[in-house]
Image (cartoon, rainbow, N blue to C red):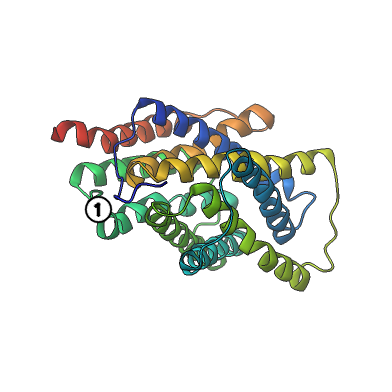
């Protein structure tokens, strides 16, 4: 049985370690998308990723004996967060197509800011404060500084349109995370995630058929490995772990770690792409992100 009371605790050390692991895996997920797109059109890749995610998460639920049967009262909530998942995925892909990858990463990583704002109004016990606001802004500035050398296309109207669309995608994701925090109090995380992904499979299939009919899949070891990484490591393990911890711990104190995601993505790129190099901006920006995370998570301790 799930708890009927709303749980919104501060994350302990072991949960913070888990979140750091997940953020690192998600950061590498950005690199896997880059490799995956070399063989799969975007909507087809989203379709296969959802299918692999359903298999992975459903397998975990089967092992733990969790019922996947949807109750009628859960249908409106599951349809809502599934629609938000589709909207944030589509707007991210479309927006990224209009702007550069680095700019898209920066504007998409605004979503923790929106989570904190939404949580202030909708999540009990997760109110915005000056310390939390300063921490969020410091973390975002650090992420921006780390990626700034890769920016290009400033002032280009096409890029500005793409930036706005990606920012809209960040809003959709933040709203989904906030609502997931509320809904997961009564819906098991495994069942919620299975239906979130499962309801999007037919949607991505139809969209892929309409817009990517003439775009073939080019199978390779690299693109296939990237797809399985997205389906099982990112969507399977990481999304399920995040959804599970979100049920108990404060959303604002979890999502602030997301500012490390693009930084870890750059670090993974340095490891696997010879042209990438370690820069002063990356080191200084990472330190500023860490300082922002500390500010957000120290607030409750100082209040005691």
Horizontal side of residue 301 vs 168, given as left or right: left
Q: Which residue is mark 1?
A: 124
Measuring from the top left, give residue 213's x and y in whole percent: 82, 69
The front one of 28 and 67 is 67
Residue 228 is situated, as x and y percent measured from the top left of the image, at 72, 42
Quadrant location of residue 216? bottom right
Toward the viewer: 272 or 89? Answer: 89
Left or right: where does residue 291 sit relative to residue 211?
A: left
Where residue 261 sits in the image (x, y, percent)?
A: 50, 39
Q: Residue 253: name its quadrant.
A: top left
Residue 177: which quarter of the image? bottom left
Q: Quadrant of the C terminus?
A: top left
| Mark 1 element type | loop
Question: How many circles with numbers are drawn on the protein?
Answer: 1
Viewer-proximal residue among 223 and 177: 177
Q: Which one is in front, 69 or 276?
A: 69
- Residue reaching furthest to the left: 304
Residue 75 point in image, percent of width and height: 51, 67
Residue at image coords 73%, 51%: 37
Task: Please name the residue shown 54% across and 63% down the image.
Answer: 82
Left or right side of 202 for 223? right
Give me the residue at 61% from left, 43% from top.
Answer: 236
Most extreme residue toward the bottom is: 210
Could you classify mark 1 by the number of other residues whose Cα lies within 10 Å: few (under 14), some (14-19), or many (20 or more)?
few
Question: Does the image show residue 42?
Answer: yes
Looking at the image, residue 290 lies above or below residue 201 = above
Task: Answer yes or no: is residue 30 visible.
Answer: no
Q: Is residue 29 above or below residue 274?
A: below
């Amino acid at each position: 049985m799930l708890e009927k009371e709303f749980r919104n605790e501060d994350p302990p050390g072991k949960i913070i370690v888990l979140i750091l692991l997940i953020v690192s895996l998600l950061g590498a997920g950005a690199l896997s998308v880059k490799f995956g797109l070399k063989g799969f059109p975007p909507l087809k890749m989203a379709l296969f990723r959802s299918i692999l995610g359903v298999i992975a998460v459903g397998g975990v639920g089967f092992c733990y004996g969790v019922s996947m049967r949807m109750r009628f009262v859960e249908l409106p909530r599951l349809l809502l967060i599934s629609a938000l998942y589709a909207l944030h995925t589509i707007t991210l892909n479309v927006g990224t197509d209009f702007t550069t990858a680095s700019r898209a990463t920066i504007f998409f990583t605004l979503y923790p800011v929106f989570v904190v704002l939404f949580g202030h109004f909708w999540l009990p016990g997760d109110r915005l404060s000056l310390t939390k606001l300063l921490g969020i802004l410091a973390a975002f500035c650090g992420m921006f500084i780390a990626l700034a050398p890769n920016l290009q296309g400033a002032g280009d109207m096409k890029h500005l349109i793409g930036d706005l669309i990606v920012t809209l995608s960040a809003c959709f994701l933040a709203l989904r995370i906030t609502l997931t925090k509320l809904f997961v109090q009564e819906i098991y995380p495994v069942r919620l995630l299975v239906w979130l992904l499962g309801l999007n499979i037919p949607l991505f299939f139809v969209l892929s058929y309409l817009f990517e009919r003439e775009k073939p899949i080019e199978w390779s070891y690299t693109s296939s490995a990237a797809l399985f990484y997205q389906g099982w490591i990112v969507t399977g393990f990481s999304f399920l772990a995040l959804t599970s911890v979100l049920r108990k711990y404060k959303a604002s104190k979890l999502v602030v770690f997301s500012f490390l995601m693009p930084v870890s993505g750059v670090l993974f790129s340095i490891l696997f792409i010879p042209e990438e190099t370690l820069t002063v901006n990356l080191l200084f920006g990472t330190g500023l992100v860490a300082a922002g995370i500390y500010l957000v998570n120290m607030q409750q301790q100082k209040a005691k």
